[in-house]
């Protein structure tokens, strides 16, 4: 397939408005994704005239052309300043996630379609320009790009109904739907803030409404910003979708979630080190959650008193060695709330649980020994009545009164 270049994507990411010039003057967030040049043309033949995901007034049966149940799409981006990741003048991509319309979500939907070599997959598909773009802008803070991309596809990408292999043109190579997923990326956040006079600074601070208003002015919709303490460090842009992820219309919407930042005194820190080398694997920081930064989505791992990691938390909040759940974290390190696909998480009578009937309580995140530990009521100690294995799981208690004691490490996903 022809390897066309992706001038628009790099343009969004790197250049200020003046440098962008006229080619993008018609740009609006309503065609945020349509505007992307893709180097492999994969077509769904769905068109974009069908109902909008999460806004349908009747049941839609062809889920190849209507994203369900994950019709609330979030494009998440990082501003990693310490350590710094990616170009100094661009946010970096985290992922494109299919939340259910009510904000709950599923993940790891089809392990049979997991990928572990995204680089070869994209190269073989002729998507070398997309790969180059990803190596610059979709980078892992530990330099482990390949694992990061595979995680994003396996965990989130396999959950898109419109990316099921049966939705692709017959004769498509295995993994073509993953290629389509990785081609759906964009990130104009830096440029949008810059257009509004907001650039990283070691001294300036901003109010939350200044930042939100600036982005709303540019994008026409309100994103959700996330801070680590007072440092701006992530953003989520929300969409509904008409048609297929492959070639549908992403309809930008206001974030259904409030930003997790203080109302004032927000820093937009300079990236310290300049663009990191994407292929570098030398001395990575220890934790994808980055000590000192609260990830917006994370798995929670149990570390026993011997220092070994033994499983972690499932979506109901129980301790298990099975595939861990992804938790959504909101707020700041000094006051955060947790949600799993089952619902809100909270502590009641000393027991941790998540679910639709659970009342949310606040937690803290504490950096310790290169890890970000979950803390409840000022203590990072948790305990259970036994150590899980196989299908045996244990309730998690927020004190050390049960026989097996451990801490819980938050690892960004
Ligand atoms: C929207 O479509 C989905 C998928 O067919 C269906 O589950 C849901 O009930 C529909 N919503 C309405 C309001 O009809």
Image: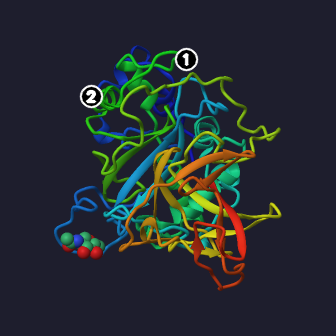
Q: Quadrant of ligand 1?
A: bottom left
| Whether residue 113 is situated above or below residue 394 in the rendered picture | above
Residue 198 falls left or right of residue 323 = left
Residue 191 lies in what quarter of the image?
Answer: top left
Report if the CB atoms under discs 1 and 2 are less than 8 Å apart. no
Residue 187 falls left or right of residue 83 = left
Label 2 element class:
helix
Label 1 element class:
loop
**Residue nearest the viewer, comparing 162 with 362:** 362
Residue 169 visible in the picture? no
Q: CA distance from mark 1 to mark 2?
A: 24 Å
Q: On the image, numbered disc 2 is attached to which residue?
A: 217
What mark, if any, has residue 302 been given in the picture? none
Whole-percent x, y for residue 347 in the image: 48, 67
Q: On the image, numbered disc 1 is attached to which residue?
A: 202
Residue 111 lies in what quarter of the image?
Answer: bottom right
Residue at screen point 51% across, 15% down: 203
Residue 311 falls left or right of residue 113 = right
């Amino acid at each position: 397939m022809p390897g066309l270049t992706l001038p628009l994507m790099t343009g969004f990411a790197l250049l200020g408005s003046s440098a962008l010039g006229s080619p993008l003057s018609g740009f609006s967030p309503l065609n945020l994704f349509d505007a992307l040049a893709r180097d492999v043309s994969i077509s769904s033949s769905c068109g974009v005239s069908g109902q909008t995901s999460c806004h349908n007034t009747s049941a839609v049966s062809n889920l190849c052309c209507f994203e369900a149940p994950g019709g609330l799409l979030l494009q998440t981006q990082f501003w990693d300043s310490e350590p710094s990741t990616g170009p100094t003048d661009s946010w970096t991509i985290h992922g494109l996630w299919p939340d259910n319309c009510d904000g709950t979500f599923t993940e790891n939907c089809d392990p049979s379609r997991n990928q572990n070599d995204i680089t070869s997959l994209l190269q073989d598909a002729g998507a070398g320009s997309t790969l180059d773009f990803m190596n610059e802008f979709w980078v892992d803070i530990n330099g482990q790009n390949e694992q990061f991309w595979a995680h994003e596809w396996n965990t989130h990408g396999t959950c898109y109904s419109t990316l099921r292999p049966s939705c692709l043109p017959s004769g498509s190579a295995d993994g073509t739907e993953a290629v389509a997923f990785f081609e759906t990326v964009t990130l104009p956040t830096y440029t949008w803030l810059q257009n509004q006079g907001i650039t990283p600074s070691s001294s300036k601070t901003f109010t939350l409404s200044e930042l939100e208003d600036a982005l709303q002015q540019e994008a026409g919709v309100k994103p959700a910003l996330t801070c680590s303490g007072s440092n701006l460090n992530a953003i989520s842009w929300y969409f509904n979708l008409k048609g297929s992820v492959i070639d549908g219309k992403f309809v930008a919407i206001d974030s259904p979630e409030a930003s997790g930042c203080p109302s004032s005194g927000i820093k937009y820190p300079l990236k310290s080190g300049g663009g990191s080398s994407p292929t570098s694997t030398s001395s990575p920081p220890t934790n994808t959650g980055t000590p000192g930064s609260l990830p917006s989505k994370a798995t929670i791992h149990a570390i026993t008193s011997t220092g070994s990691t033994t499983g972690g938390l499932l979506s109901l909040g129980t301790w298990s060695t099975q595939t861990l759940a992804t938790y959504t974290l909101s707020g700041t390190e000094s006051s955060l709330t947790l949600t799993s696909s089952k619902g809100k998480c909270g502590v009641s009578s000393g027991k941790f649980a998540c679910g639709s009937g659970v009342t949310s309580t606040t937690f803290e995140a504490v950096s310790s020994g290169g890890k970000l530990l979950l803390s409840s009521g000022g203590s990072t100690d948790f305990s259970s009545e036994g150590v899980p294995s196989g299908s045996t799981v244990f309730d998690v208690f927020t004190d050390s009164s049960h026989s097996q004691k451990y801490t819980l490490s938050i690892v960004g996903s």
